[in-house]
Amino acid sequence: MAIERTFSIIKPDAVAKNHIGAIYNRFESAGLKIIASKMVHLSKEQAEGFYAEHSERPFFGALVEFMTSGPIMVQVLEGENAVLANREIMGATNPAEAARGTLRADYANSIDENAVHGSDALTSAEREIAYFFSAEELCPRTR
Ligand code: YYY
Ligand code: MG
């Protein structure tokens, strides 16, 4: 088992519904440690850059509009197999298909407003963490 870091977003829908604390509780209860965190309101350019891999998809415009519709929480989670662990906590992209007890089953309404983002691989985690945080902003736990 490897200690990994992954990147997470609480999206505008879940922030607007006051679910930040409940979602942080899920991360911590699962043994993932929050080692960096901040609230940001993305510009159109920031959202387009973050989701560049989806720029040719039909939902891209709606995704950027949604992600800029209100503030988000961005955080770095650290722990055993953090990338996969966070994806399991999140549940499937479409909340209608998300397993019971996952964040998307409990807090998301639709595939386009689905409460949370999580990196899908270690390489994307590194890129996504660097997109929002400088090295100095990451606070590894020493106790
Ligand atoms: O990684 P994950 O968020 O679970 O899904 P992706 O396939 O990477 O898509 C990113 C994002 O795009 C998804 O969370 C919602 C949105 N989206 C959509 O609105 N409609 C789709 N059919 C697929 C994805
Ligand atoms: Mg993805």
Image: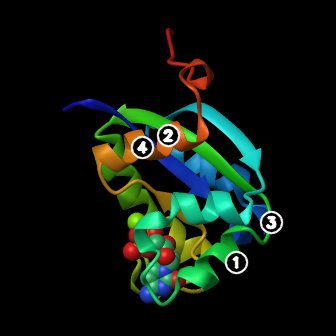
Question: Which residue, as the protein is rendered here, is positioned at the far top?
Answer: 142
Position in image of residue 43 (x %, y %): 74, 60
Q: Which residue is drawn at 45% across and 56% down?
A: 118
Q: Which amino acid does label 3 sit on?
A: Gly
For this rendering, which residue is in front, 45 or 72? 45
**Disc 4 marks which amino acid?**
Arg
The Cα–Cα distance between marks 3 and 2, rounded to whole angstroms, is 20 Å
Residue 65: give its label.
1
Task: Tell me if 7 is positioned left or right of 21 in this view.
Answer: left
Q: How far apart are marks 2 and 4 (CA)?
A: 6 Å
Left or right of 75: which side holds 99? Answer: left
Callout 2: SS = helix
State the SS at label 4: helix
What is the crowding at mark 3: few (fewer than 14 residues within 10 Å), some, or many (at least 20)?
Answer: some
Query: Circle 3 sits in a helix, a strand or a loop, which is it?
Result: loop
Task: Compute the Cα span from label 1 to label 4.
Answer: 22 Å
Looking at the picture, does residue 92 appear above or below residue 27? below
Residue at 71%, 66% (x, y): give it.
Answer: 44
Q: Quadrant of the N terminus?
A: top left
Q: Nearer the viewer, residue 136 or 103?
A: 136
Q: Which mark is residue 129?
A: 2
Q: Of callouts 2 and 1, which one flags the residue occurring earlier in the amino acid sequence?
A: 1
The amino acid marked with disc number 2 is Ile
* Sequence order check, earlier mark of 1 and 3: 1
Q: Are marks 2 and 4 in contact (CB under 8 Å)?
A: yes
Q: Which mark is residue 127?
A: 4
Q: Is there a contact, CB below 8 Å, between mark 1 and mark 3? A: no
Q: Where is residue 70 in the image (x, y as percent from the top left)?
A: 80, 66
Residue 93: quarter of image: bottom left
| Dot 4 crowding, Cα within 10 Å, few <14, some 14–19, many 20+ | some
